[in-house]
Amino acid sequence: MRRTDVPVTVRTARWCAVHPWKAIAGWVLLLALCVGAGAAVGTNKGTFADFWIGEAGRAEAMASGSGLTPPPVEQVLIERKPAGEARSTAGNSTVGKATADAGQPAAAAEEIRRRMAALPAVESVAAPVVSAAHPETVRVAVTLRGDRETAKKDVGTLLAETAAVRRAHPDLTIEQTGSASISVAVNDKQGQELRRTEMISLPVTFLILLVVFGAVLAAGIPVLLALFAFVGAVGLYGLASWVFPDAGGAALSVIFMMGMAVGVDYSLFYLKRAREERERSGGTIPPARAVELAAATSGRAVVDSGLAVALSLAGLYLVGDVVFSSIATGAILVTLVAVGGSLTVLPALLAKAGHRMDGGRLARRRAARRRAARRGNGSGRGEGRVWAVLLGPVVRRPLVALLAGVAATVALAAPALGMRLGTEGKETFPDSVPAVAAYDRLVAAFPSEGPAHLVLVRAEDPAAPLRKIAAATRGDALFAQDTEPVVRVAEDGRTALLALPVPYAANSPEATRSLERVREVLLPAAVEGTRGLERAVSGEIAAGADYAAHQERRLPWVVLFVSLASLAIMYVAFRSVVLAVLGTVLNLAAVMVAWGVLTLVFQGTWAEGLLGFESLGFVGSRMPLMVFAILVGLSTDYQIFVVSRIREAVRRGVPTREAVVDGIAGSASVVTSAAVIMVSVFVSFLFIDRIEMKQLAVGLTGAVLFDAIVLRAVILPSALALLGDRAWWPHRPAATGPPPLDVREQSPAGRTILV
C-alpha cells in the first residue's frame, strides 16, 4: 500500500510505536507546558456582570452605573441553645470559665460588633436587632467594603472573629451567613467532595478494567491516560479562561467527569482492539503491528467520536451564558486532549509494554477460548456468543422489537412533558453547610432578610413611583412585613432603588407570584404617565426567572445546532444519510429519556432518602441543556464504535442483517465495559452534596443505561435489520476483504500471517 493511502492515524501510531520513548517524553513535555502555562497566566474568573441576563441584568447595570448596587452584607445570627444542649457543649468546652453573661445573646452581639468594627474589610456594623417572632434570637448586620467579589476574599477574617466569639459563648449558637460566606463554604465543600469523588472513581475504574483485561498493566494505562487528559485540560482551561471566563467550580467538575468518561473509553477501545488483533494471530504478530491494525479501525473511530463530542459541546456556546461557555470550554479541551493521548502516547505505551499487555494466565485462557469459539462457528463472533443469542430474536422479529423499544422510550420520556425548571440559590444549597443552615434560620426569624425584589427606576423624580409601590405592598402576604421597605436615591437624583423583601424561598410559587405582581401590576401602575422613564426589576427571584426564560429561548437553537453537527459527523464517518438520520434520532431519544428520568426523580419525593436530597419540586434550569449536549456527544460516540464494527463486517461480504449481529456482538464486551465505567464515574457524583451535581449524575446515568439496554441492543439492530442494505444509502461499503493493511509477516512457525 502506498504511504499516501495509509490513514494518518496509522502513520502516527506507527511512528509512536517505533519511537516509544520519544512519543512518551513528548507527551509528558506537552502536559508540563499546558500545566505550566495555565499556572503562569492564572484563571480569569467571571465577574458578576458576566452573569447579567434579561431584565434583571438591565436592572443590575442600572444599579451599578448609578452607584446603587447593594453592598455585600454578612449577618451574624445569635441564638440561645436548648438547655440540655448548652450544658453538654459547655462541659466539652476548652475555653475555660465563661463570663457571667456569656449565655446572653445581647452580650455576644456587642462582642461581635466590637470585633467586626476593628477589621479593615468592614465598612460598618449595624446595631443588634431582636427577632419579633423569636425574642431570644439576635442578628448583627456587617457591611463589607468593596463589592461582592472582594467580599469573598475578605470574608475569612470575619468568620475567624465569629468563631472566636462562638468559643467564648458556649451556651449560644453563633453562626455567620451571607452571600460571601455561603459561596465560599459551598465551593470549599464541593471541592472536597470532588476530590473524594476522584478517590472513588479511580480505583473503581481500575477494578473494572482489571476484570475486562485480566492484566494490571492493561487496566492501569487507560486510567493513567484519563488522568493525563484531566491534568492537561485543567492547564489549558486556565489559558482559555481569558477568552471564556471561568464561572466557578462547575466547570472543574465537568472536566473531571468527561475526562474519566472519554479518556478511559478511547483508551479502552484502542487497547481492546490491539489485543484482539494479537489474539487473532495466536499472539504471533508483534505488539507494534497490532497497534497499527488498531489505529486503522479504532483510531479512526476515536477521531470521529472526539469530533462528535466536541461539536456537541460547542452547541453550549449558543446559550450566551458564562456558565455554559466555561463548561463547554473545559469539556471540549479534555475531550481533545484525550483523543490526542489515545492516538500518540497510547500506541507508544502499548508497543513498549509488549507482550505484558496480553495479561496473565487468566487472560490467556480467555483468549484461547475465544479463538476456539471462532474456529468452531467460523463467524468471528465467539467473543460475543451471549450477545449474538440475545440479538437473535431482535433481528428475526425486527418490527416487534422496534415497536417494543419505541414504547419503552416513550414511557420513560413522557414525564419530561411535565418538567418544571428552577434556578439554584441559597435555599437549594445543602443544609450540611453551616452558613446555609444559618441562612434558613435567619430568614425564619427575620423574613425581611430573605430574597428581595430590587426595583430600579430612572426618571426626573424616581423616588415617587417607588414610594407608591412600597405603600401598595403593606399588608400584602406576598411581601415581608417585619420591616419597612427603603428607597435609596442615587447621587445624581435620577435613579432610585427599592428593595422589596419576600418571606418565601426564591424558587417558590409565592415568590414567582410576587415577581409577577411587581413587574406586571405594581410597577406599571406606579409609573403610569411618567415621561423619560427607564425601569427594571432584579433580585434573586427575578434573576432566576430571567435565566430560566433565557435558556428556554436558546434551547431550540442549541438542539438544532447539535443535531446538525451529529448528523454531519455520522455522515462523514459512514457516508450514509440513513445512518446519519437514524443516529440523530437515537441521540434525541436518549436525551428525552434522560429528561424524563430527571423529572421522575427530582420533582417528586420518592427518591429523596435513596439519593440523599430534598426535593425542590423542579429540575435545575441548566440541566436540560447540559445533559443534552453531553449525551448527544456520548451517544454518538457509542454509535460510531458499534456501526464501525457493523461496517467492517459488511466490507467482509457479510449481509447487513448478519453484519448487525456480528458488529454488535463483536463490540459488545468493550462497549458494555465502557458504559459500565461511564456509569461508575457518573454515579460517583451522587456523593457530592449539591442538588445540581446529583441531577447531572442521575440524568447521565439513566441515559447511558438506556442506551446500552434499549437503544444499542433493541432499537438500533431492529432498525438496521428492517432497513437492510438501504441503511447504507447512498454509499454501500465496498467489499475490501479482511486485511486493513496490505502487510505480511512470517510467524516463528513459518506461517504467513496477513496483517
Image (spheres, rainbow, N blue to C red):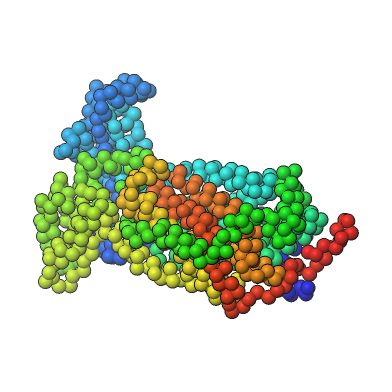
Instruction: Tell me where residue 469 sits by quadrant.
Output: bottom left
- Quarter containing the N terminus: bottom right
Q: Position of residue 123 (x, y in %)?
A: 28, 46
Instruction: Tell me where residue 377 sits by quadrant.
Output: bottom right
Q: Position of residue 119 (x, y in %)?
A: 33, 41
- Quarter containing the C terminus: bottom right
Asked if residue 628 lies left or right of residue 148, the reply is right
Residue pictured at 72% horizontal, 54% vertical:
373
Q: Position of residue 646 (x, y in %)?
A: 63, 66
Of residues 318 and 452, which is closer to you in this image?
A: 318
Residue 557 visible, this angle:
yes
730 w.r.t. 276: above or below: below
Residue pictured at 30% horizontal, 40% vertical:
438
Residue pictured at 41% horizontal, 51% vertical:
695
Asked if residue 223 lies left or right of residue 485, the reply is right
Residue pictured at 37% horizontal, 47% vertical:
183
- Going by the picture, which residue comes out furthest to the right? 750
